[in-house]
Amino acid sequence: GAAAAAPVPLDRVVPAPASVRPGKSPYTIRPTTPIRVEPGSRAARTAGDYLAGVLRPATGYRLPVTARGGGDGIRLRIVRDAKRSGAKGTGAKGTAARGLGAEGYRLVVTRRAVTISARTSAGLFHGIQTLRQLLPASVERATRQPGPWRISGGTITDVPRYAWRGAMLDVSRHFFTVDQVKAYVDQLALYKINKLHLHLSDDQGWRIAIDSWPRLATYGGSTQVGGGPGGYYTKADYREIVRYAAQRHLTVVPEIDMPGHTNAALASYADLNCDGVAPPLYTGTEVGFSSLCVPKEVTYDFVDDVIREIAALTPGRYLHIGGDEAHSTSHDDYVAFMDRVQPVVAKYGKTVVGWHQLTGARPAKGAIAQYWGTDGSEKEVADAAKNGTRLVLSPANRAYLDMKYDPSTPLGLSWAGYVEAKQSYDWDPGSYIADAPPSSVLGVEAPLWSETLSTSAHIAYMAFPRLPGIAELGWSPRSTHDWDDYRVRLAAQAPRWDALGIDYYRSPQIPWPAAE
């Protein structure tokens, strides 16, 4: 009808763009529209092929990807910074690139063309996610739809507020297959998330094959919460997740939690226990009862082997060593352990990430602490931030996607309280930790712990609608941050989720459109 024909306004996008200038003339994708990519640019060609793959099923159009020039169609351009390329003056391309950084993009829509410009392939990819939201929601369907495929005229210039915009998936409490992880990666990419933190080991399961300690996966990965069969990733499986995530510009951050949360490892190798006795496998949900044996030298052989093998599989810069809830490790042992282990991460070329308890030890130079407290008052976190430790914010009562929405939510936990859509959105990462310099904040992350989750439908129900809000806190400028405006933009995402088969929670706080 008439409502469907009116194009989506540029300011309806989630996350909110940094700058929006509406224009007069919309652009319409037609059966003859080409996707024009910069000649000789592999980044632009890859982005063009991806865009064509997104648009062809629902439009039914050919959308040929071509390097032939022309003023019409959908154009993807990699622009260079004039100063950097040594060009004289500021030509059109130099000006175009200014201020876009490593992930920004500019999207210009006129009657003749849609042009996405960026300095990097990541920027083009993020611009394409915005373009998807400017098309009718039916563009996300896998079968041919009627159209018309109209895009509002104007210009969006967009750069992220924070470099770290993450989501964590706990594959230890319940195992999720490669295909299930890929499905979540696709959902994360829609909202410009750029880190996939995989929680690969815990008391209930070890989920990554380690050649030098094979029983970790084959025995330690053989079960899960509730006693199901568990599972683990072969090295090929893990590489496939890394490859798939990288295509969508997400960096995989692997986590091996230590010295606590280690029962699966302790059960697999008796030597890792101080008393030399392996405990039974564990399928419950209690925390804080396990610890690697800090005084034993074999512990550090084990840690070195595990970090070496995972670092070799992981192209990203980061390796997460956990460090939370080590209640069975004395403070002195905890500090001694972290003093030994952090240099091992550096030895294999990675940057240490740990849960914020790491700040109670001696964080290595350049280390990142992931905050999961609830009120931002921890002095040792602020002190570490003043000393150069960077912070990723995941406050449990705001960003934990496994908290119940309300007492009737059938999934999830409630130890940090109930977290409805507004509460997950209505906070500012830049000022959340009392006395921490705003410049210490690297970004935000939304963890999804899986004690109660075992299917992709469970993941989607707990992540949506909260995940897009955390994504917006990570991407959008502080000035755009407004719950009343956001809830209207968020509501407009629902038909896209329906088209994509994302089974979300219909929060009563959101003015959802009537079901079609």
Image (cartoon, rainbow, N blue to C red):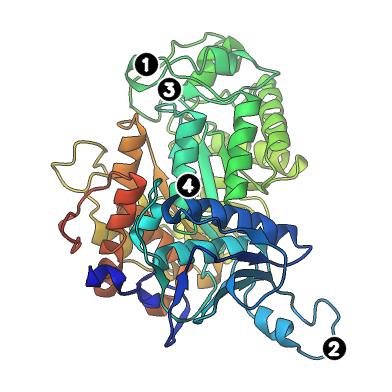
Looking at marks 3 and 4 on the same chain, the residue that comes earlier in the sequence is marked by 4
> From the viewer's perspective, is residue 65 above or below residue 57?
below
Residue 324 in view (yes/no): no
Displayed quadrant of residue 283 = top left
Whether label 3 touches label 1, CB < 8 Å: no
Looking at marks 4 and 2 on the same chain, the residue that comes earlier in the sequence is marked by 2
Instruction: Find residue 494 and report its horizontal and vertical position in percent.
Output: 28, 56
- Amino acid beneath label 2: Lys
Q: Nearer the viewer, residue 205 or 265?
A: 205
- Amino acid beneath label 3: Gln
Cα–Cα span, label 3 and label 1: 11 Å
- Residue that label 1 marks: 228
Q: Nearer the viewer, residue 13 or 271?
A: 13
Crowdedness of circle 3 by 10 Å Cα count: few (<14), some, many (20+)?
A: many
For image coordinates 51% across by 82% down, the residue present is 110
Instruction: Find residue 167 and report its horizontal and vertical position in percent.
Output: 46, 49
Looking at marks 3 and 1 on the same chain, the residue that comes earlier in the sequence is marked by 3
- Amino acid beneath label 1: Gly
Q: Is the C terminus in the top left, top right, bottom left or bottom right quadrant?
A: bottom left
Q: Which mark is residue 186?
A: 4
- Residue that label 3 marks: 204
Looking at marks 3 and 2 on the same chain, the residue that comes earlier in the sequence is marked by 2
Whether label 1 touches label 2, CB < 8 Å: no
For this view, does 297 lie left or right of residue 480?
A: right
Cα–Cα span, label 1 and label 2: 65 Å
Q: Which mark is residue 88?
A: 2
For this view, does 294 lie left or right of residue 484?
A: right
- Amino acid beneath label 4: Asp
Secondary structure of the residue carrying tag 1 is loop
